[in-house]
Amino acid sequence: NLSEHDNSETLNSDWTNFITNKEVKNLEKFENPIFLIVCKAHYQVSVEKDIKQCLISLRSAISHTESHKYASSILQLYLSISDDHVSAHKFLDKIEEKLENEKKHLLRSNIYEAEENYDQAIQYLNKSREAGLSFSNYIIRYTYLLLKDKKFTKVKIAFEESISFLEEQNDIDILTINKELAEKEISGKVKDKVAIRNIISRKPSQNLILAAECLLENDVTIKRLLNLIIEKDYSNLFYLSCWPVIPSRYFDIYKLKKETNCDLKEVDELTAI
């Protein structure tokens, strides 16, 4: 299952074996179902590092009659590699009647986040919560958006009011990292280094370890982990570059790679909905 490769060293080869499989090729030729189009788009950016072809595949997915079934995957990938937010809104407008309110509002929140319209992003996040989004997903997302909006005091308040209601250790760790980043932005230093070191010692996902190492400013480890994560799956470059916990300077080395894959403005014109 390609979705379960968080720490797998064989992700790229497994992706390639799947995409080049004879049966998959025949399915693409004669039926081209939506799930295969979406898989191909992920493969094109994750393994082939071909942003232009990925956007073309996403255009095909967006126009598919069953695109609503993979709306989250389509929009997550599209928003990470394209600044065409207008088309993202239009796509959601087209399919929203087929989506549950919780999902519809959350996707709208994600688009507004990409636009850096954080007030609207939080407004639609609240609507998603009212429609059934779990508290843990809500509070983690809420504090993340506050961090993006540089409202660090509100992050600390949200942490104090919410941490006792979380049960899963992974959720507690993420919220702790968000709170400690807010503390660092306010005072210039991490308040509870022991809590951050404990997160690292529990050996959660590589992404979470990377976030913790960024708070502790372990430069060599940060560069090593970031390179491992991006080499494993190139799409991580686009997702992680949005994380406020990772200083932007760590992505400078990747900028040329990103820009030389294609002219994103030209591709956005090709893929406009």
Image: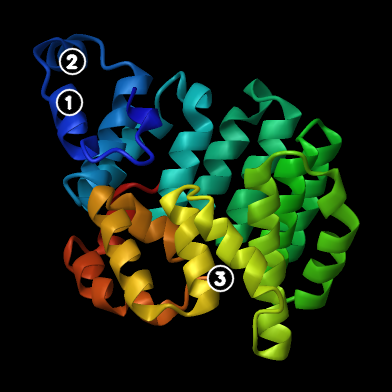
Which of 5/200 is in front? 200
Q: Amino acid at mark 1?
A: Ile
User: Tag on residue 240?
Assistant: none
- Which x, y percent locates residue 262? 19, 61
Decide: few, some or many residues near mark 1? Use Cα within 10 Å; few <14, some 14-19, many ≥20. some
Residue 239 is at least partly visible in this image: yes
Q: Quadrant of the N terminus?
A: top left
Residue 114 falls in image quadrant: bottom right
Vertical position of residue 126 compared to residue 217: above or below:
above
Vertical position of residue 123 compared to residue 220: above or below:
above
Please, what secondary structure does the residue beneath circle 2 have?
A: helix
| Residue named by callout 2 | 24
- Which x, y percent locates residue 13? 15, 34
User: Tag on residue 244?
Assistant: 3
Q: Residue at x 23, y 41 (%)?
A: 9
Q: Residue at x 49, y 73 (%)?
A: 214
Do the CB atoms of the residues marked 2 and 3 lie less than 8 Å apart?
no
Of callouts 1 and 3, which one flags the residue occurring earlier in the amino acid sequence?
1
Q: Marks 2/3: CA distance?
A: 39 Å
Please, what secondary structure does the residue beneath circle 1 have?
A: helix
Vertical position of residue 129 compared to residue 123: above or below:
above
Q: Residue at x 76, y 56 (%)?
A: 122
Q: Amino acid at mark 2?
A: Val
Q: Marks 1/3: CA distance?
A: 34 Å
Do the CB atoms of the residues marked 2 and 1 lie less than 8 Å apart?
yes
Q: Residue at x 29, y 67 (%)?
A: 224
In the drawing, does residue 13 fall left or right of residue 1? left
- Which x, y percent locates residue 200? 51, 59
- Which x, y percent locates residue 242? 49, 64
Which of 129/214 is in front? 214
| Residue named by callout 1 | 19
Q: Nearer the viewer, mark 1 or mark 3?
A: 3
